[in-house]
Amino acid sequence: MLAPSVTLLFLWMLVPLVLTLYFSTLRYNLLAPGVTAFTGLQNYSYFLSDPAFRTAITNTLVLVSGVLVITVTGGILLALLLDQPMWGQGVVRLLVLAPFFVMPTVSALVWKNMFLNPVNGLFAHLAGALGLQPYDFLAISPLASIIGIVSWQWLPFATLILLTALQSLDRDQVEAAEMDGAAASARFRFIVLPHLARPITVVILMETIFLLSIFAEILVTTNGGPGIASTNLTYLVYAETLLRFDVGTGSAGAVVAIVLANIVAMFLVRMIGKNLAA
């Protein structure tokens, strides 16, 4: 009964992968589509030896690590805050979760034009009101700006997962520790944080898989620049294929990106498996 759907899903995943592998072995440029030649692993050698590749790998790691640190830390703090009884709790929770439902392209445009713009942006007006020189975030600190935008988008996801886990915490255990004289910091360190260990691992796994393919925010805000200062691996593959029209090298880069993403995913899956078994 499942065979048709499984076959369709398998072909939907397999055919693009096979075509990508095929094109990665060809000298194929979109400006000369009728001129192709088999090059073997030459495209891979060219892509891996490109100085932009090392910069893209570094930027990808910095982007993923920065967003994870901000979202996990901020998610824990927001989950602790939203777990407290307050007036309008439902509305506050809805507002905190709202950024996750905004399309990446839309949020990047909003941040670029309404907040980070050095002339008309909100931060520029605040700097002017304080007598300071406006700061051109996307030109001077492009990668940090993208990390901030992406973190704003993914912070609600981490908050939702951690808040759900926090609400399943045994309150009797916390109250017993409080009655025994344990300080708030001690209760958080020895009771709350161990309880959140597994949800934090899930957040890291899910976010890492998606953050490795961040593209829209970079395209809309910096186009990978200035130069290649904010180019990650996904954007580099896009630039090779659709800006330089080199389908062969771009396909080789896509294969490299797939391999690296699967290595990271396998490592994280094993890590979460050990965490759950513990």
Image (cartoon, rainbow, N blue to C red):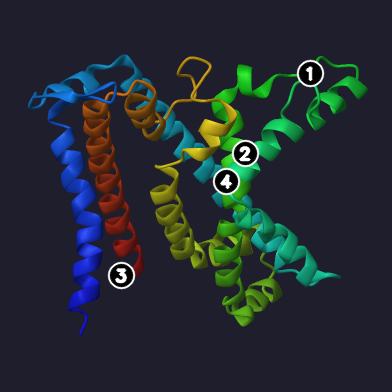
What residue is shown at x 48% (from left), y 64% (from top)? 199
Q: Which residue is mark 1?
A: 134
What residue is shown at x 28% (from left), y 26% (from top)? 30
Local crowd at mark 2 within 10 Å, few (<14), some, or many (≥20)? many
The amino acid pointed to by label 3 is Ala
Q: Quadrant of residue 47?
A: top left
Structural distance between the alpha carbons of marks 2 and 4: 6 Å
The amino acid pointed to by label 4 is Pro
Nearest to viewer (mark 2 / mark 3): 2
Could you say which is closer to the camera, residue 4 or residue 57? 4
**In the drawing, what numbered circle is on residue 104?**
4
Structural distance between the alpha carbons of marks 2 and 3: 39 Å
**In the drawing, what numbered circle is on residue 277?**
3
How many marks overall?
4
Could you say which is closer to the camera, residue 103 or residue 271? 103
Q: Mark 3 touching mark 4, by CB under 8 A?
A: no
The amino acid pointed to by label 2 is Ala
**In the drawing, what numbered circle is on residue 108?**
2
What residue is shown at x 25% (from left), y 59% (from top)? 12
Q: Mark 2 touching mark 4, by CB under 8 A?
A: yes
Task: Name the element at disc 1.
Answer: loop
Q: In the rendered image of this protein, does residue 216 appear above or below residue 87?
A: above
